[in-house]
Image (cartoon, helix red, strand yellow):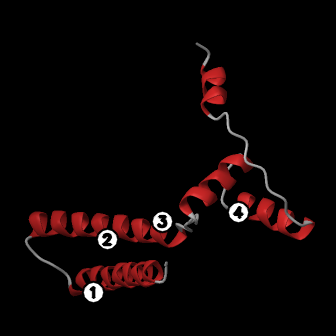
Amino acid sequence: MDTKTNKKSRRNILIHFCATEDEATLIRQRKIDSCMVSLSAYIRKMAINGYHINLDLTDIREMVRLLSNATNNITQLSRRVNEIQNVYADDVEDLRQKYNSLWDAANGIVKGLSKIK
């Protein structure tokens, strides 16, 4: 059986509602903001779940970048310690600053997520 036909036959109940022009515009804009492709899928999701959360992952990407930097710096510092059996204070301070930046980013993300209701 054709998958497209199967999906259509599965959803065979039509639900119809009226909206003002402003409401229709707002619904379409929110659908676009949600990054969902289909208006009917968006309306169905909203009707069933009551909400749609669209997360901005910019801060998480920055945190991952900082975590990668910190990991690379720790690896470099470990290699240097193994090679010359010595640690330079500047290297440790640089690592501490990057580690603090990572914690600041993580705390910002946690605070942002705690605001989601």
Graded by Cα atoms within 10 Å as few (under 14), some (14 to 19) or many (20 or more), the crowding at tag 3 reads few
Q: Is residue 104 left or right of residue 10?
A: left
Marks 1/4: CA–CA distance: 43 Å
The residue depicted at 31 percent of the width and 71 percent of the height is 70
> Farthest residue in the right direction?
21
The type of residue carrying mark 1 is: Glu
Q: Earlier in the sequence, mark 1 or mark 4?
A: 4
Graded by Cα atoms within 10 Å as few (under 14), some (14 to 19) or many (20 or more), the crowding at tag 1 reads few
Dot 3 corresponds to which residue?
61
Marks 2/4: CA–CA distance: 34 Å
The residue depicted at 54 percent of the width and 69 percent of the height is 58
> Farthest residue in the left direction?
85
Marks 2/1: CA–CA distance: 12 Å
Local secondary structure at mark 4: helix
Residue 98 versus residue 94: which sits nearer the camera? 98
Graded by Cα atoms within 10 Å as few (under 14), some (14 to 19) or many (20 or more), the crowding at tag 4 reads few
The type of residue carrying mark 2 is: Ala
Q: Which of labels 1 and 4 is toward the front?
A: 4
**Tag 3–tag 1 contact (CB < 8 Å):** no
Q: Is residue 26 left or right of residue 55?
A: right
Dot 2 corresponds to which residue?
70
Q: Quadrant of residue 55?
A: bottom right
Marks 2/3: CA–CA distance: 14 Å
Image location (x, y in percent) of residue 65? 43, 66
**Tag 2–tag 3 contact (CB < 8 Å):** no
Dot 4 corresponds to which residue?
33
Local secondary structure at mark 3: helix
Graded by Cα atoms within 10 Å as few (under 14), some (14 to 19) or many (20 or more), the crowding at tag 2 reads many
Q: Earlier in the sequence, mark 4 or mark 3?
A: 4
The type of residue carrying mark 3 is: Arg
Dot 1 corresponds to which residue?
93
Q: Quadrant of residue 71?
A: bottom left
